[in-house]
Image: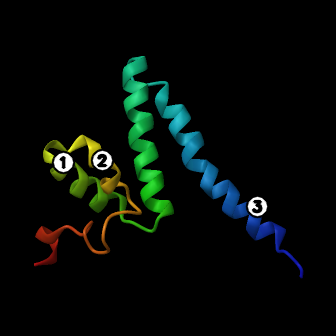
Amino acid sequence: MMVNWKSTTTLRKRALRAVALGRKNYLFAGSDRGGESAAAIYSLIGTAKLNGVDPEGYLRNVLSRIAEHPINRIEELLPWKLPQGSTEDSSRAA
């Protein structure tokens, strides 16, 4: 079986681009705490993308629910645990 190394390399470069951009942006986070917060958001967005979930819809869904969600069940809010369609923004559907 012949592997197309060029396309494999392109996919890897594309995946690492977000890391490189994030690294540059972390310099302007304002503080160590700001950098940690930015890294957490970048991680959530990247994880949502890797799981085929719309990052904006996912963050809207989770941020609207997290304050009332029990901490001992926080894993239910992970992108791969949410039911299909639960990350869609219903206000845009009309």
N-terminal of the pair, mark 1 or mark 3, is: 3
x%, y% of residue 91?
11, 68
Residue 85 placement, left or right of 9: left
x%, y% of residue 85?
27, 74
N-terminal of the pair, mark 1 or mark 2, is: 1
Residue at x 85% of width, y 75% of height:
3
In this view, the mark in front (1 or 3): 1
User: Local crowd at mark 2 within 10 Å, few (<14), some, or many (≥20)?
Assistant: few
Residue with the mark numbered 3: 9
- Asked whether the beta carbons under mark 2 and mark 3 sit within 8 Å of each other, the answer is no
N-terminal of the pair, mark 2 or mark 3, is: 3
- Residue pushed farthest top? 31
Question: Which one is nearer the viewer's eye here, 28 or 34?
Answer: 34
Which quadrant holds residue 79?
Answer: bottom left
> Residue 74: which disc?
2
Quadrant of the rendering where the C terminus is positioned: bottom left
What's the distance in space between the residues labelled 1 and 3, CA to CA?
41 Å
Q: Residue flagged by tag 1: what amino acid is it?
A: His
Residue at x 25% of width, y 41% of height:
71
User: Local crowd at mark 3 within 10 Å, few (<14), some, or many (≥20)?
Assistant: few
Residue at x 48% of width, y 29% of height:
26
Label 3 secondary element = helix
Which quadrant holds residue 67?
Answer: top left
What's the distance in space between the residues labelled 1 and 2, CA to CA?
7 Å
Residue with the mark numbered 1: 69
Label 2 secondary element = helix
Q: Residue flagged by tag 3: what amino acid is it?
A: Thr
Residue at x 36% of width, y 58% of height:
55
